[in-house]
Amino acid sequence: MNQDITGVILVGGKSRRMGRDKAFLDVAGKPLLERILDVFRASFDRIVLVGDREERFAAYDLPVVPDIYPGSSLGGLYTGLFHAATEYIFVSSCDLPFLNANILRHLCSLQDGFDAVVPSTEHGYEPLFALYAKSCLGPIKALLEAGEFCAYAWYPQVKVRYVSEEELAHINKDGRAFLNVNTPDEFARIGEDL
């Protein structure tokens, strides 16, 4: 159980492409959010949900904080960092059905000397399943205030530990850890993979 990292789950997305709230999509009899919470509760003492619909998440008895800069995952990341009582947060979007606790723990173990620890796959960075320090607040805020919302455009301004697919291969054996769902078709394919 990690006491110096706050688990932050982004639940504020509009789910436009999905057409319904992704946090509550049923995967193997459990809402996506609960699948993520199971891993987070086993990993972190503190968990915060970032989103603007507090009443939807009341049953989880967790702090729900509205986005300081609404409308983007970068704003959600900033909000989670801003409100965290710890120096580090581990952030996850709410649409990862195969969240891997071992990868999460490995990423957290690499925090020393870095502002961010981010998986880097053949598809690019995974900024919404990564570890961030409070030192990232300034660069993120500057980007948001400039009207830029790329979740990783600020990385060159901080010390990032990139974690390659090769480094994670032994704990991401099925290769599904970073698979997320954005559309009904993607959600249907997830069901086939269970």
Image (spheres, grey):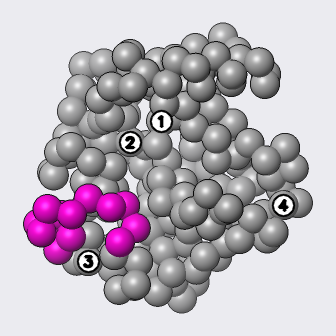
Residue located beneath label 2 in the image: 10
- Comes first in the chain, label 2 or label 1: 2
- Comes first in the chain, label 2 or label 4: 2
Q: Is residue 45 above or below residue 192?
A: below
Asked which secondary structure carries label 3, the reply is helix
Q: Amino acid at mark 4?
A: Ala
Q: Amino acid at mark 1?
A: Cys
Q: Amino acid at mark 3?
A: Pro
At x 42%, y 49%, the residue is: 8
How many angstroms separate mark 1 from mark 4 (CA)? 23 Å
Residue located beneath label 4 in the image: 169
* Residues at circles 1 and 4 in contact by the CB criterion of under 8 Å: no
Majority secondary structure in the magenta region: loop
At x 57%, y 37%, the residue is: 180
Asked which secondary structure carries label 2, the reply is strand
At x 35%, y 72%, the residue is: 153
- Comes first in the chain, label 1 or label 3: 1
Residue 87 seen in render: no
Q: Amino acid at mark 2?
A: Leu
Report crowding for label 3: few under 14, some 14 to 19, many 20 or more residues within 10 A (C-alpha).
some
Extreme top residue here? 29
Residue located beneath label 1 in the image: 94
* Residues at circles 2 and 1 in contact by the CB criterion of under 8 Å: yes
Which residue is at the front of the view, 172 or 44?
172
Residue 148, how many percent across, how many down? 21, 63
Mark number for residue 123?
Answer: none
Task: Please identify the quarter of the rendering in which residue 111 is found.
Answer: bottom right
Q: Which quadrant, please, contains the N terminus? A: bottom right
Per the rendered image, the range of residues in magenta is 141-153
